[in-house]
Amino acid sequence: MKLLHIDSSISGQNSVTRGLTRKIVEQQKVANPGLEVEYLDLALQAPAPLSLDALGFRLPPSAEALTDIQRRENEISEALVTQLIAADVVVIGSPLYNFTVPVQLKAWLDRVAQVGRTFKYTEKGPVGLLGGKTVILALSRGGVYSTSDAGNAMEHQESYLKTIFGFMGVTDIRVVRAEGMDMGPESRERGLAQAQEDILALAA
């Protein structure tokens, strides 16, 4: 089995999600001896946001019309989507920044959401091509959003990630959620305890 471990927090050692993804990956190693792990730190290695040049992956790599810049961007996109396709399990750490995912994670998603690779269009509509994978989302939030309709309407982190991976055909999406991280020591402790329970539930 292959596991792709992705972190996107810009908070370094203070990151809640980085701690959560480490625990999840260690748990997966114990459950799956011989597990191959690839690590991608998007805070350090994020692809450039989509631009006219970065859309080169929509054309064949050898297309004569591509410029040198487009070829380089094409190679980046190809490497990222190939890495994702090869993984059996994907563990993603994502804090909530201004109600959504970090821009670094969004840039990665824009590169791997490729027609013909991770989804395709048919006469009946789009069909995802990543069925059979497990995606584990390790999420942190300063406030609490999951316990009310108003909170759920405001967060575009978990909902967005479930939507885009669902669009790419992933049906096994599991969530580890640490909420209330900025609402005082007691709230933070409760949120981390809940996240630990979520991690333990993954093993079950």
Image (tube, helix red, strand yellow):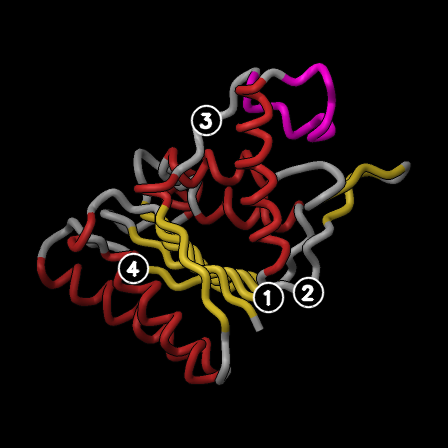
Q: Can you tell which mark lies on residue 88?
A: 1
Gap in angstroms between the C-alphas marked 1 and 3: 26 Å
Observer able to see residue 134: yes
Residue carrying label 2: 132
Residue identified by numbered label 4: 178
- Answer left or right for 151 relative to 54: left
Would you name the residue on which mark 3 appears?
A: 49
Q: Is mark 3 on a helix, strand or loop?
A: loop
Helix, strand or loop under label 1 = loop
Q: Is mark 4 on a helix, strand or loop?
A: strand
Region in magenta? 53-66
Q: Which of marks 4 and 2 is in front?
A: 2
Q: Tell me which amino acid carries mark 2.
A: Gly
Looking at the image, is mark 3 or mark 4 nearer the viewer?
Answer: 3
Label 2 crowd (10 A; few <14 / some 14-19 / many >=20): few
Q: N-terminal of the two: label 1 or label 3?
A: 3
Q: In this view, does 196 lie above or below 61?
A: below
Q: Locate residue 152, reporting x and y percent.
A: 42, 45
Q: Do the residues labelled 1 and 2 touch (CB within 8 Å)?
A: yes
Give the CA separation, mark 1 to mark 2.
8 Å
